[in-house]
Amino acid sequence: MASRKTHPISGRMPQMMLALSLAATGAALPRHAHAQASAITGSQVTTATVETIDSGSGEVLLRDRTGGFITVRVPKDVHNLPHVQPGDQIHIRFFQTIAADIAAPGSPPPQSTVTSAHGLANRHPHGMMVSYQRERVRVLAVDAPHNVVTFVDPGGITRTVTVKEKPIQALLATLKVGDSVDVTTADAVSFEVMNRVVTPSTTVTEGAGQAAGTAPPAHP
């Protein structure tokens, strides 16, 4: 059976990737220094074919070179990405980090954000999106020696997870019951549509200060 991966997705892609990489190198700090930690949880570069597009859910199903499936979720409020269609061949890059930050008492809850852009890369349609999914959880129990934490999420659901990322594991030793922790998952996605090229439309006109594509001024 073919494997399937899901990536919820967010010009400036190299700078975004660098910023996420720098954030992921941070180690846990002592509690009095506002303890926080982050780690890289995924990185992939591949070529894939667009299989289906669900305009209702925003899901784009891709098949990679090995026959595995990748699902990319595009938030409904993102409108400026290049148009893709079934059969398109795309070169796609994923990068993901997770961060945990002990929230200061009385601070406002974090907000999720999405940034996107489109353009051309060697005349190929190019798009990027960086998504920051943020939520505040409340710690109910901590088993630091076994890297296990139990918390209640914003929806009131109690969850118990085993933390696998070493920087986040180091943060567990600083947690206590009742702490509020802001958890941020950052997903960066960049892609190029390889089977289509775009020739930018340009118009050369004479006359200082005249915008391209406009008609020259009329002469009496």
Image: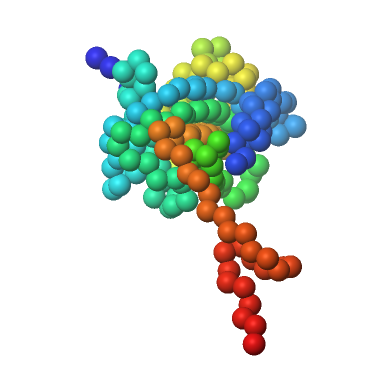
Q: Is residue 80 above or below residue 166?
A: below
- Which residue lies at the image location 57% right of the left edge and 64% below the top edge? 213
The location of residue 20, given as percent across then percent down, is 62, 31
**Residue closest to the far front:** 220
Q: On the rendered image, what quadrant is the C terminus found in?
A: bottom right
Front in this rendered view, residue 178 or 23: 23
**Residue closest to the far top:** 145
- Colour scheme: rainbow
Question: Is 100 left, or right, of 3 in this rendering?
Answer: right
- Which residue lies at the image location 28% right of the left edge and 48% below the top edge? 56
The location of residue 168, given as percent across then percent down, is 59, 22
Q: On the rendered image, what quadrant is the N terminus found in?
A: top left
**Residue closest to the far left:** 1
- Which residue lies at the image location 35% right of the left edge and 28% below the top edge? 49
Front in this rendered view, residue 123 or 174: 123
Q: Which quadrant holds residue 145?
A: top right
The answer, for residue 59, to whether it is visible in the render is: no
Q: Is residue 7 above or below residue 11?
A: above
The location of residue 133, given as percent across then percent down, is 50, 40
Question: Is 147 left, or right, of 70 in this rendering?
Answer: right
The answer, for residue 218, to whether it is visible in the render is: yes
Give the mark count.
0
Question: Is 84 left, or right, of 141 in this rendering?
Answer: left
Front in this rendered view, residue 152 or 164: 164
Front in this rendered view, residue 96 or 112: 96
- Which residue lies at the image location 33% right of the left edge and 25% below the top edge? 63
The location of residue 172, given as percent across then percent down, is 59, 22
